[in-house]
């Protein structure tokens, strides 16, 4: 069952399409990472899903409900944390949690207390006095304490120092082991997402280029290396699954994006003069770099 | 509700400092009121100072309300895409309700309670406090909704302040724009009418629309999630509304017309006296004061002095003065249609006015004071000084109307037609139709309803020239019926009913307004024309105000007379209008090119028949149970086989057949201007009908009938469409009617009606279609 499903979802700002015909499905129980460079449309997608923005066209369903019709009933099962969310910073942490508590019938006070301890939050501190990372933690506690079915995190790691980021991820992972929720996370921080997500989607210029489980993705992307005489020619046309091809002297390397067991024989047939064949799996980051080059993604995705 | 209150409590914590400031602002007037009562009761200067402070605080409060409304934008903001509440279980409606409750408590309820307390301290009655509070709440709501609308589309407080700085002055400027426009209309209208008198109604309408429009825009903004297009288009419409709303009154402008055929009555002038008479009690919110009559005596016939404006000052024995500005008594052209006896008698001289003692002068406001000021003059001898802006007017007989149905005359663009004369009680009832009158909206002081007023400075008198006697209409007999639909047209139509009653208690105890007297009577229409404006000073010493909370009896004190010298002007002697020379209405022969003349088949679905006259329906309002549909008349879908699109239908309930008698009819004339026609070329009416199987009649309204005893012929409205032919030779008068010869040369209109002889407290349903006159 899909917790989130969009069909041809489009959101325009004037003539510009921030989200362009997006077809996205997020399975129940998954941790789905929506990756893309800055300006790819990740935040707009999430805001449209949360009915903060109305779609220009297309449809989006969240928890089985049209995003434009999301009501308090659905929002009581959704946790949303955004990097620049306006929370009442004049409140203390404890006041903030007490204020939120009234709106959620499923609010678990003990769970909230546990989260506060786990994230090392000081209840007597005013939110405006907290560091950015701690503030994100407080916002996360306020969005987890009622055990939402769906947790939506918009760029949660942005601006966090490595230690806080690690704590943050560990916290979510531990909870995910305990709770049966679905997490949709948007980020351009590939390394952190790799630790967290089990499903990934790549967004650029408002379009979804890829959406599949990370394990499957890593299984089908393989870095291939071999030696090839200078005089040897490459097959024409190049196989469409080859990406990031580099040839320097007798050294040739490329990324096979449709790798499967026993594929080396096929590759040897395509390059009979090659020898010294080697293959190595790619990290998520390396996959994204390859993809970025292939699709000529927008600059600014330096972390990809 | 608990969640809404949960949000409100959060907002109270959030804005505790501004709330404290707001409470302080609301508390200052209360403090001033207490100080005022304790220490300033005998010191009017100190009291005036308190009053200025009070009004200063009111201004501060207005700014506070606007600012505070904008500041609350930060909580549950509808203008942001990062608002926390949007992804919480808080619906837009809940957010709006919470904000409305918060703003209502601290920006409306608190100031209103503060005002109530101040007024109560000053001894103002609960009723007046209620009026004052309603008005205050209305104005505060207006400001809050406008500010809230701005706050809903401005994502930061800074932008809100910029927008408010631009928009609120524009709102005030819109008021000036309205004034400018009204003055322009005043100057162009002929005869002029004071369009500015409509300002009160307009400002209430604008306020209500601002509140309603603002509420809709705010709710839409919360619901539509940052859909600025919706709000901007709404604001654009609101701005457009501000700019063009004065055009609403454009249709009240009347094209210039030459002056009437009447002429001025002979005038000689001498010294005038003004009297303070019948000082009475009045307590309209927001002021309290005295009204009285400024009666100008010793004038010559045909001329009068009217008070336009009074600038009063109260002088205390110690020389201290208090002036509360001037107050306009209304338009110089707003006349009461019931002139006082003296004026009317002079205007009608040398006729004897037989029912003159039935009329009492209408009071003017001599003094209107703020309730808190009022209290300071209680039981203290004061001198009243005033500058009176006066207007000299001249009475002009515009014309005479014989008591014949259909008689009338035209004066400029005004056309007056006599509709009916019938006996009533110890007198007669006259119905008139005026076209082209200056109408205006105004507020009835008793019912508080907005109604039409006739602002034409005209009155009527019933005159018997042979006997040299006259009657004025009963002061409260006027029953003016204005067709609202037609009132929107360039030519406005008004119907009014005047009652002339003999006065056994008057000076001529033997006078009787009976059929012998009225036999030679005519209806005279008199217009009051302005001549010049001038100013006089009035000083009345040694009186004191009565306690506001009790209503003293009216009293007359003829001993108090004050002389005013009024400049003398000489006017030419002129002739009274030759009444017999005025035009009369005559009937026109109605013909048909073929064997019949189609009066109407209703196929256009409108209310104008094929000859250009209007269809209408009407029923009694005698509380006999009569109900009529449709009202106003409109053709209904479905028709007879010959014309299937539309037909005329009336349905409802016919009241109980008893005095003062029910009636229901569907009627139309034969000419666009309600003229009379001659049906000599025709022998019968033919039409299709259907209905409830009950008996109905077709009546022919003629000039000869003066008692509704029209010639009529009966028919049955069967369940299915049936064609009926009613020969004119078969028409008859009811048994109770005054018999008149059968003659079709003075026909005004026809009417379909339930047969009054059969119907009583019964439902009716009548369809008619394809109505023809047959040769």
Image (tube, coloured by chain):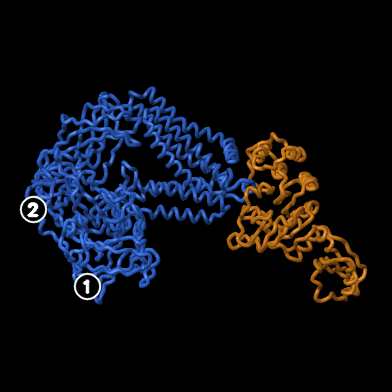
* Residue B231 placement, left or right of A114: left
Q: Chain of mark 1?
A: B
Q: Which chain contains the residue that carries disc 2? A: B
Q: Position of residue B323 (x, y in %)?
A: 29, 33
Residues indicated by labels 2 and 1 sit on the same polypeptide chain: yes
Dividing the picture into quadrants, the one containing residue B409 is bottom left
Residue B158 x %, y %: 54, 45
Quarter holding the N terminus of chain B is top right
* SS at badge 1: loop
Between discs 2 and 1, the one toward the N terminus = 2
- Which residue is depicted at the point 43% across and 34% down? B57
Residue at 87% x, 74% y: name it: A270
Vertical position of residue B336 compared to residue B604: above or below: above
Furthest toward the left, the residue is: B466
> Is the residue marked by circle 1 packed among few (<14), some (14-19), or many (20+) residues within 10 Å?
some
Q: Which chain is blue?
A: B
List x then y, in percent, for residue B733.
20, 60
Q: In the picture, one chain is orange; tell me its letter.
A: A
Q: Which residue is mark 2?
A: B575
Look at the picture and state if B335 lies above or below B702: above
Please name whichever residue, B57 or B296, is drawn nearer the observer in this view of the structure: B296
For mark 2, does the 10 Å Cα neighbourhood hold few (<14), some (14 to 19), or many (20 or more) residues?
A: few
Quadrant containing the C terminus of chain B in the rendered view: bottom left
Residue sitting at 27 percent across and 64 percent down?
Answer: B613
Q: Find residue B591 and name its label.
A: 1
Percent position of residue B313, x then y: 26, 32
């Amino acid at each position: 069952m899909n917790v989130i499903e969009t069909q041809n979802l489009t959101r325009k700002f004037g003539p510009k399409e921030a989200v362009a015909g997006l077809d996205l499905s997020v399975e129940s129980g998954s941790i789905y990472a929506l990756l893309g460079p800055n300006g790819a449309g990740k935040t707009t997608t999430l805001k449209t899903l949360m009915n903060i923005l109305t779609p220009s066209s297309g449809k989006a369903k969240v928890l089985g409900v049209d995003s434009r019709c999301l009501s308090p009933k659905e929002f009581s099962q959704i946790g949303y944390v955004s990097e620049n969310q306006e929370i009442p910073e004049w409140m203390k942490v404890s006041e903030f949690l007490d204020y939120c508590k009234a709106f959620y019938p499923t609010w678990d006070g003990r769970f909230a207390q546990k989260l506060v301890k786990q994230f090392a939050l000081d209840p007597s501190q005013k939110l405006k006095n907290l560091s950015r990372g701690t503030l994100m933690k407080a916002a996360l506690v306020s969005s987890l304490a009622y055990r939402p079915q769906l947790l939506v995190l918009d760029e949660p790691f942005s601006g966090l120092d490595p230690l806080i980021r690690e704590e943050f991820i560990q916290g979510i992972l531990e909870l995910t082991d305990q709770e049966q929720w679905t997490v949709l996370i948007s980020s351009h921080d590939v390394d952190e997402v790799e630790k967290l997500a089990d499903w990934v989607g790549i967004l650029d210029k408002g379009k979804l280029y890829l959406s599949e489980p990370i394990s499957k993705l890593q299984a089908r992307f393989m870095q291939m290396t071999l030696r090839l005489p200078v005089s040897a020619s490459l097959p024409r046309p190049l196989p469409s699954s080859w990406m990031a091809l580099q040839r320097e002297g007798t050294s040739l390397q490329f990324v096979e994006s449709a790798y499967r067991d026993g594929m080396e024989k096929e590759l040897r047939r395509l390059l009979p003069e090659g020898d010294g064949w080697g293959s190595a799996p790619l990290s998520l980051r390396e996959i994204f770099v390859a993809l970025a080059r292939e699709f000529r993604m927008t600059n600014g995705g330096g972390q990809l | 509700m608990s969640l809404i209150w949960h949000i409100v409590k959060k907002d109270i914590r959030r804005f505790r400092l501004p709330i404290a400031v707001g409470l302080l602002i609301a508390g200052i007037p209360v403090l001033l009121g207490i100080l005022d009562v304790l220490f300033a009761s005998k010191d009017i200067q100190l009291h005036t100072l308190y009053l200025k402070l009070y009004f200063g605080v009111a201004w501060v409060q207005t700014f506070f309300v606007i600012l505070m409304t904008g500041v609350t934008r930060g909580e549950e903001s509808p203008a942001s895409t990062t608002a926390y509440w949007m992804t919480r279980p808080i619906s837009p409606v809940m957010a709006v309700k919470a904000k409305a409750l918060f703003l209502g408590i601290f920006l409306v309820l608190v100031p209103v309670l503060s005002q109530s307390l101040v007024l109560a301290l000053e001894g103002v009655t609960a009723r007046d406090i209620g009026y004052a509070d309603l008005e205050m709440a209305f104005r505060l709501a207006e400001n809050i909704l406008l500010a809230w609308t701005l706050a809903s589309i401005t994502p930061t407080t800074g932008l809100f302040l910029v927008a408010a700085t631009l928009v609120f002055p524009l709102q005030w400027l819109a008021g000036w724009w309205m004034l400018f426009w009204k003055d322009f209309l005043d100057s162009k209208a002929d005869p002029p009418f004071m369009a500015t008198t409509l300002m009160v109604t307009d400002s209430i309408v604008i306020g209500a629309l601002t509140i309603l429009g603002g509420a809709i825009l705010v709710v839409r903004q919360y619901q539509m999630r940052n859909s600025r297009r919706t709000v901007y288009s709404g604001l654009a419409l609101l701005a457009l509304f501000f700019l063009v709303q004065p055009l609403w009154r454009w249709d009240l402008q009347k094209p210039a017309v030459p002056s009437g055929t009447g002429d001025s009555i002979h005038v000689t002038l001498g010294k005038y006296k003004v009297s303070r008479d019948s000082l009475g009690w009045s307590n309209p919110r927001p002021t309290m004061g005295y009204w009285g009559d400024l009666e100008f005596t010793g004038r010559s016939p045909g001329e009068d002095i009217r008070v336009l404006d009074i600038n009063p000052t109260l002088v205390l024995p110690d020389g201290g003065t208090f002036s509360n500005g001037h107050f306009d008594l209304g338009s110089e052209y707003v006349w009461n249609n019931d002139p006082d006896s003296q004026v009317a008698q002079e205007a009608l001289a040398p006729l004897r006015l037989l029912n003159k003692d039935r009329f009492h002068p209408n009071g003017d406001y001599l003094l209107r004071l703020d309730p808190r000021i009022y209290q300071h003059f209680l039981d203290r001898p004061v001198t009243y000084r005033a500058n009176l802006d006066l207007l000299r007017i001249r009475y002009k007989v515009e014309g005479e109307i014989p008591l014949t149905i259909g008689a009338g005359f035209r004066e400029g663009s005004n056309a007056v037609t006599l509709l009916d004369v019938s006996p009533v009680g110890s007198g007669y009832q006259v119905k008139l139709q005026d076209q082209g009158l200056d109408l205006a909206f105004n507020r009835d002081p008793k019912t508080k309803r907005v109604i039409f007023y006739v602002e034409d400075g005209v009155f009527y008198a019933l005159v018997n020239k042979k006997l040299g006697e006259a009657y004025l209409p009963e002061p409260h007999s006027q029953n003016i019926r204005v067709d609202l639909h037609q009132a929107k047209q360039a030519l406005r139509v008004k119907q009014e009913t005047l009652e002339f009653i003999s006065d056994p208690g008057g000076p001529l105890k033997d006078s009787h307004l009976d059929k012998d007297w009225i036999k030679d009577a005519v209806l005279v229409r008199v217009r009051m024309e302005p001549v010049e404006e001038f100013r006089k000073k009035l000083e009345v010493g040694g009186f004191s105000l009565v306690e506001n909370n009790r209503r003293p009896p009216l009293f007359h004190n003829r001993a108090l007379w004050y002389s005013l010298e009024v400049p003398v002007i000489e006017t030419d002697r002129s002739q009274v209008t030759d009444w017999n020379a005025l035009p009369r209405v005559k009937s026109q022969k109605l013909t048909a090119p073929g064997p019949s003349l189609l009066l109407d088949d209703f196929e256009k679905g409108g209310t104008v028949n094929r000859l250009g006259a209007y269809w209408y329906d009407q029923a009694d309002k005698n509380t006999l149970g009569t109900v009529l549909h449709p009202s106003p008349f409109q053709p209904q879908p479905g028709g007879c086989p010959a014309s299937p699109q539309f037909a005329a239908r009336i349905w409802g309930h016919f009241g109980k057949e008893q005095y003062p008698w029910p009636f229901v009819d569907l009627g139309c004339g034969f000419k666009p201007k309600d003229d009379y026609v001659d049906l000599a070329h025709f022998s019968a009416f033919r039409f299709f009908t259907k209905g409830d199987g009950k008996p109905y009649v077709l009546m022919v309204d003629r000039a000869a009938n003066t008692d509704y005893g029209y010639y009529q012929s009966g028919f049955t409205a069967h369940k299915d469409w049936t064609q009926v032919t009613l020969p004119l030779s078969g028409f008859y008068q009811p048994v109770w009617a005054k018999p008149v010869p059968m003659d079709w040369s003075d026909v005004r209109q026809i009417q379909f009606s339930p047969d009054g002889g059969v119907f009583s407290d019964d439902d009716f349903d009548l369809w008619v279609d394809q109505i023809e006159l047959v040769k």
